[in-house]
Image: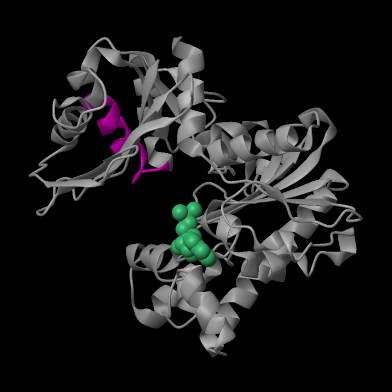
Amino acid sequence: MKILVINCGSSSLKFQLIDSDSEAVICKGLCERIGIEGSQIVYTPTGKDKITKVEPMPDHNRAIELVIEALTNSENGVVSLDEIGAVGHRIVHGGEKFTKSVVIDDEVIKAIEDVSDLAPLHNPANLIGIRACQKVMPGVPMVAVFDTAFHQTMPQEAYLYGLPYSYYEKYGIRRYGFHGTSHSFVSKRAAEILGKNPADLKMIVCHLGNGASLSAVDGGKCVDTSMGLTPLEGLIMGTRTGDIDPSVVEFVMKKENSTVADVTNLLNKKSGVFGLSDNLSSDFRDLEAGYNEGHAGARRAVDAFVYRVVKYIGSYTAAMGGVDVICFTAGVGENSGFVRKLICDRLGFIGAKMDAEANKVRGEEKVISTADSKVTLLVVPTNEELAIARDTYALCK
Ligand code: AMP
């Protein structure tokens, strides 16, 4: 079966067409600037050159039409429309309603709408993507795959904030966690690589990308993760603060005479390693270069980022009563031996020893610990699209 995977943002739409038998990507691409002047679709049929078409896209319906046109046109298309057997949609927030992927029907759409206040920037865009696909591909089964679902096994002691309990009951204010599709995929793949049963492993997955989060996975189940009600909590990220004292919000508002929206923007878009480096960059390639040149901002930002990751690894080791495997994934985790080394150099207290030669790896599955390391250190590239395609196939075959 050919599965179309859709990741719909407010003004962008990423897609991949995946063959469920071979799990090969047949075509992938991106619609940019939907609803904004200068919109374009960029896509690459596997083995062919990248194609860019500048086309007006007033809304997501038009974007989906162009995706279908790109996949099926007679010149460089890769399938006929009736070959697309199912569509998998990435949905950011499933609240407590969704603990696993589900086939989309009217009830599911209503439930996604109901939790939209928990992710006001993301869920409405995801819903637009679903409706646009339904319009263009009526009758094709669709599946919702939630970023929050894998973390729904967290125990109450890990997901509750120290707020009056009634706020959890009335408003659902609790920690949900994100990047769940990635944490699930990587933890399962790590067990496969090591030839172990996930039930026998205590694992920490470090998803270090522009957005970054850690999860503690005990016996194959998530028991804690660093993001919270929203993806702002936890690690210091590309442009997000991660954990801060909530009083900072009011303090900054008074000092800068600014609004809640201004401060929310500051915490999400201007902070993290970008803000800490004095706006040098949010990209770890630039920060690594700056670090090695002795740029004070780059050093401060990278050191704070690494410290926070190490602190979380320590706390998750305590939470699980030990750790067997630490996995690195996503843009930084897969590609930056520099950042992995800085982190692992501080993990001697749990008996983790990095193999410097093995750590030269980039974007490939590899054990990067020494044979006598008490903890296995592993690089596992994530593949959220494949994980979505697998769930979609499992529910629609
Ligand atoms: P992601 O959000 O997973 O796509 O990760 C994107 C981030 O990965 C970028 O902003 C970079 O900081 C980082 N990244 C990608 N390639 C490299 C690399 N070769 N070395 C260091 N960092 C990288």
Residue sitting at x 60%, y 33%: 150
Q: From the viewer's perspective, tell me whether residue 159 is left or right of residue 316.
A: left
Query: Against 330, is 62 above or below?
Result: above
Report the side of 336 relative to 15 (left or right): right
Magenta segment's dominant SS is helix
Name the one closer to the observer, 205 or 314. Answer: 205
Colour convention: one colour
Residue 21 locus on image (x, y percent): 48, 18
Q: Is residue 360 magenta?
A: no
Residue 155 in view here:
no
In this picture, residue 103 sits left or right of residue 168: left
Which of the 4 image quadrants contains residue 136?
A: top left
The residues colored magenta run: 119-132
**Circle count:** 0
Q: Residue at x 44, y 76 (%)?
A: 252
State which quarter of the image contains the N terminus. Answer: top left
Q: Nearer the viewer, residue 187 or 267?
A: 187
Q: Is residue 180 left or right of residue 47?
A: right
Which quadrant of the view contains residue 4?
top left
Residue 95, relative to residue 258: is it above or below?
Answer: above
